[in-house]
């Protein structure tokens, strides 16, 4: 996951640098527009990955603006593995599409279902098996100490408990600590399809975290 994210970051940096060079050399508006579209699409797909914050449209608009463009449209469903954007620079319109290969996001150390509620563990194991490895566990059961570490990191990143709570639950309030939640990586669309097809007792309660699944109460 880290290598892929780093690669995306590098591509974004190159896109920004290319945009500046184009402006400095009086390149055509078409080239500038395409550079901005490429950067916006890459930013959107990176933001949609498990390491992002689930705000692909905002990321696309940000990188389009950094390249002197305006985002006209973003086909950017949260959790999707492909993003398409349409931008405009001085009246010239360009589009770009970026695709993220979920297989390349596999972490070096895949998580396990150990410590999860038996019903949740069984459902997740079935998804991993039926997906032929295209879906895997990123984070399952967490000890209170680990949740405290994540909470401290979120506080440092977002600056307040109110903002941090949108992304990480405080220690003692996370369903990960109870074995009732799991974060999945890989092909999340395939995971959702399998949940429906196999009628598994899972749901996604957090719209901004499409990788977060919890055990449904039936």
Image (cartoon, helix red, strand yellow):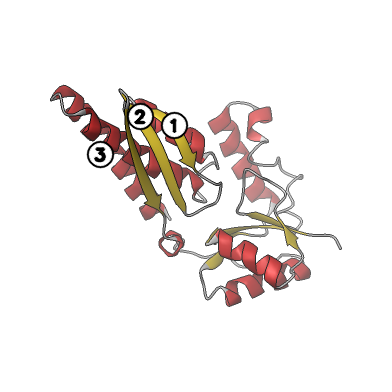
Vertical position of residue 215 compared to residue 15: above or below: below
**Nearer to the camera, 214 or 83:** 83
Vertical position of residue 79 compared to residue 66: above or below: below
Q: Quadrant of residue 176?
A: bottom right
Residue at 36%, 54% (x, y): give it: 3
Badge 3 crowding class, 10 Å Cα cut-off, few under 14, some 14 to 19, many 20 or more, is some
Residue 215 at x, y percent in the picture: 76, 60
Left or right, residue 80 beside residue 36: right
Q: Nearer the viewer, mark 1 or mark 3?
A: 1
**CB within 8 Å, label 2 to label 1:** yes
Badge 2 crowding class, 10 Å Cα cut-off, few under 14, some 14 to 19, many 20 or more, is many
Residue at 77%, 69% (x, y): give it: 119
Q: Secondary structure at mark 1?
A: strand
- Location of the C terminus by quadrant is bottom right
Mark seen at residue 180: none
Q: Name the residue beneath numbered marker 2.
A: 88
Mark seen at residue 72: 1
Residue 115 at x, y percent in the picture: 71, 65
Residue 83 at x, y percent in the picture: 44, 47
- Location of the N terminus by quadrant is bottom left
Left or right, residue 41 beside residue 151: left
State the separation of the CA atoms marked 1 and 3: 22 Å
**Nearer to the camera, 130 or 80:** 80
State the separation of the CA atoms marked 2 and 1: 7 Å
Q: Secondary structure at mark 3?
A: helix
Is tag 2's residue or tag 3's residue first in the polypeptide sequence? 3
Q: Name the residue beneath numbered marker 3.
A: 14
**Nearer to the camera, 197 or 5:** 197
Q: Secondary structure at mark 2?
A: strand
């Amino acid at each position: 996951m880290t290598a892929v994210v780093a690669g995306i970051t590098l591509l974004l940096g190159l896109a920004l640098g290319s945009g500046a060079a184009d402006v400095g050399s009086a390149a055509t508006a078409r080239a500038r527009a395409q550079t901005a579209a490429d950067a916006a699409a890459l930013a959107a797909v990176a933001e949609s990955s498990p390491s992002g914050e689930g705000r692909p449209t905002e990321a696309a608009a940000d990188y389009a603006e950094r390249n002197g463009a305006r985002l006209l449209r973003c086909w950017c469903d949260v959790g999707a593995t492909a993003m398409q954007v349409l931008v405009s620079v001085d009246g010239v319109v360009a589009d770009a599409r970026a695709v993220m290969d979920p297989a390349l996001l596999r972490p070096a150390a895949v998580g396990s279902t150990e410590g999860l509620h038996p019903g949740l563990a069984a459902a997740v194991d079935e998804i991993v098996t039926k997906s032929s490895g295209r879906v895997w566990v990123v984070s399952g059961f967490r000890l209170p100490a680990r949740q405290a570490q994540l909470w401290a990191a979120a506080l440092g990143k977002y600056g307040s408990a109110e903002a941090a709570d949108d992304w990480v639950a405080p220690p003692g309030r996370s369903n990960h600590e109870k074995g009732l939640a799991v974060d999945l990586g890989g092909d999340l669309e395939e995971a959702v399809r399998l949940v429906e097809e196999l009628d598994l007792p899972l749901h996604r309660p957090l719209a901004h975290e499409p990788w977060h699944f919890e055990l449904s109460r039936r």
